[in-house]
Image (cartoon, rainbow, N blue to C red):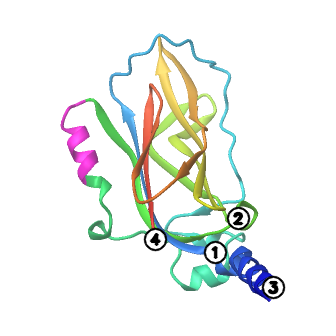
Amino acid sequence: MRRALLLMILAFLANPAFAGWYKVEVLVFARNHPVSEEIWNTALQPRYASQSVTIGAPEQSEYVNASDLSRGAWQPLSEEETSLQYMMERMASTGDYRELYHAGWRQSIGNKADTTPVYLRGGRTLSTEDGDVPEFEGTLHFSESRFVHVSPRLWFNTESSGERFYVDISEGRRLTGSDVYYFDHPMFGMLVRVTR
């Protein structure tokens, strides 16, 4: 009897319809004076999940969960509901950083197959040989098993010695609690906070 009850509870929790509902906040910033001895692969080109949802325009994606959409998922939170802007203001006051993207929203997070990646785009619009491109873009794919995980595929278009090229942040991470998580790169960085 206990085993049957345990199996029912596990099946209930594994059902994507009962994915956890979370508040997500993301801040992406560029370093104004990057210092690095690294030699960059200048042939990298942006690759990220094409089946994604855009914050503030989720209805434009055919991949969103209609139930989540009706609950207000992927709509921008007000400034009062977010907390990372204060950190960006302090960082910007040093003259070393500038904001590329900042938003907060709510969404359900379930297993990876049933959670739609979120598309981010920000910074300046750059004129290149390939036409106008965003300075920063990519996707964040959240999932939950025992803990919440995030898999970023973020691309930053930067310049060194007169040559434009892309660098990326693609290292996934497990997120526990309501801490702010820092994703580091010599050219740009990201702060992520996920709370219930």
Q: Earlier in the sequence, mark 4 or mark 3?
A: 3
Distance, label 4 to label 3, CA atoms, is 29 Å
Residue linked to disc 3: 4
| Mark 4 burial class by Cα count in 10 Å: few <14, some 14-19, many 20+ | few
| Mark 2 burial class by Cα count in 10 Å: few <14, some 14-19, many 20+ | some
Using residue 119 as the reference point, say whether residue 190 is left or right of it.
left
Q: Nearer the viewer, mark 2 or mark 3?
A: 3
| Mark 1 burial class by Cα count in 10 Å: few <14, some 14-19, many 20+ | many
Question: Magenta includes 89?
Answer: yes
Q: Amino acid at mark 3?
A: Ala
Residue found farthest to the front:
1
Residue linked to disc 1: 19
Locate residue 141: give its quadrant. bottom right
Q: Earlier in the sequence, mark 3 or mark 1?
A: 3
| Mark 3 burial class by Cα count in 10 Å: few <14, some 14-19, many 20+ | few
In the drawing, what numbered circle is on residue 72?
Answer: none
Residue found 65% across the figure and 37% down from its top? 46
Residue linked to disc 4: 196
Residue found 48% across the figure and 14% down from its top? 162
Q: In terms of depth relative to the viewer, which is nearer, 126 or 86?
A: 86
Q: Amino acid at mark 2?
A: Asn
CB contact under 8 Å: marks 1 and 2: yes
Distance, label 1 to label 2, CA atoms, is 8 Å
Which residues, given as a range, are shown in magenta? 86-95
Magenta segment main secondary structure: helix
Q: In terms of depth relative to the viewer, which is nearer, 129 or 98?
A: 98
Residue found 56% across the figure and 40% down from its top? 133
- Residue 86: x percent and y percent? 23, 52
Q: Earlier in the sequence, mark 1 or mark 2?
A: 1
Classify the position of the N terminus by image quarter. bottom right
CB contact under 8 Å: marks 4 and 3: no
Residue linked to disc 2: 111
